[in-house]
Amino acid sequence: MPEPAPRRHLPVLQTKDEPPSPDEDRPPWHWAPIGAVATFLVWLPLAALAESLTAGTTAGEPATSGVFRLSAQALACFAGAFAGGLLVGRLGGKAGRKEATLSGLLASAIAWLIALSQSDPSSAFMWLVWCLLLVILATIGGAAALLGGRLGLRLRPPRPHGGPPE
């Protein structure tokens, strides 16, 4: 039986001695869509919960129940955007308040587009209402994500080289 051929080893590229830090893993702008996804992951269950809790209020005064339902949904939006901003601020590497705020704005704009696609704003007045809704959603989402991002930056562990978080 012939002897097997000796194994040949492929050359290995030399790597740096130190592994890259987690801050260098991804560019900061990647954290805006990540935060928007996190916003939806928190916002949607809270919105469903708010809807189920306020569904029985329609039997009462219509104006009061409408304000109550709208407030519950706005609170769900705020909580979701805050959580998304907190995630970006806490785990975002080089990302900071700007990327956290963008995540809330992005989630609000996507939610607005989804809601707009389900309706038919045929009159100019309805377009005005939809534009006003976009401004309100963007304000809630952006402000909540900014607050969450600020808190996340404060909760971020200190950097190895001793510098403050961005």
Image (spheres, rainbow, N blue to C red):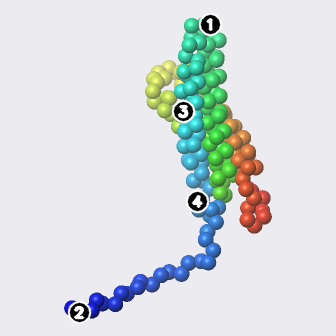
The nearer-to-camera label among 4 and 2 is 2
Label 2 crowd bin: few (<14), some (14–19), many (20+), radius 10 Å:
few
Looking at the image, can residue 14 be seen? yes
The nearer-to-camera label among 4 and 3 is 3
- Please report the residue visible at 68 percent of the width from the left and 50 percent of the height from the top: 90
Locate the N terminus by quadrant.
Answer: bottom left
Q: Which mark is residue 61?
A: 1
The correct choice, above or below, for 33 with respect to 46 in the image is below
Q: Which mark is residue 44?
A: 3
Instruction: Compare residues 120 and 100 and report the one nearer the observer.
Output: 100
Mark 3, secondary structure of its residue: helix
Judging by the rendered image, the residue that carries numbered circle 4 is 26
Instruction: Tell me where residue 12 appears, x and y as whole percent.
Output: 47, 81
Dot 1 or dot 3: first in sequence order is 3
Label 3 crowd bin: few (<14), some (14–19), many (20+), radius 10 Å:
some
Q: Amino acid at mark 4?
A: Arg
Label 4 crowd bin: few (<14), some (14–19), many (20+), radius 10 Å:
few
Mark 1, secondary structure of its residue: loop
Q: Amino acid at mark 3?
A: Leu
Dot 3 or dot 2: first in sequence order is 2
Dot 4 or dot 3: first in sequence order is 4
The correct choice, above or below, for 47 with respect to 103 in the image is above
The nearer-to-camera label among 1 and 2 is 2
Q: Which mark is residue 2?
A: 2
Measured in 3D between alpha carbons, the distance from the residue under mark 4 to the one under mark 2, in whole angstroms, is: 52 Å
The correct choice, above or below, for 4 with respect to 74 in the image is below
Residue 136 occupies which quadrant of the picture? top right
Measured in 3D between alpha carbons, the distance from the residue under mark 4 to the one under mark 3, in whole angstroms, is: 27 Å
Instruction: Compare residues 127 and 46 and report the one nearer the observer.
Output: 46
Instruction: Tell me where residue 76 appears, x and y as whole percent.
Output: 62, 30
Measured in 3D between alpha carbons, the distance from the residue under mark 1 to the one under mark 4, in whole angstroms, is: 52 Å
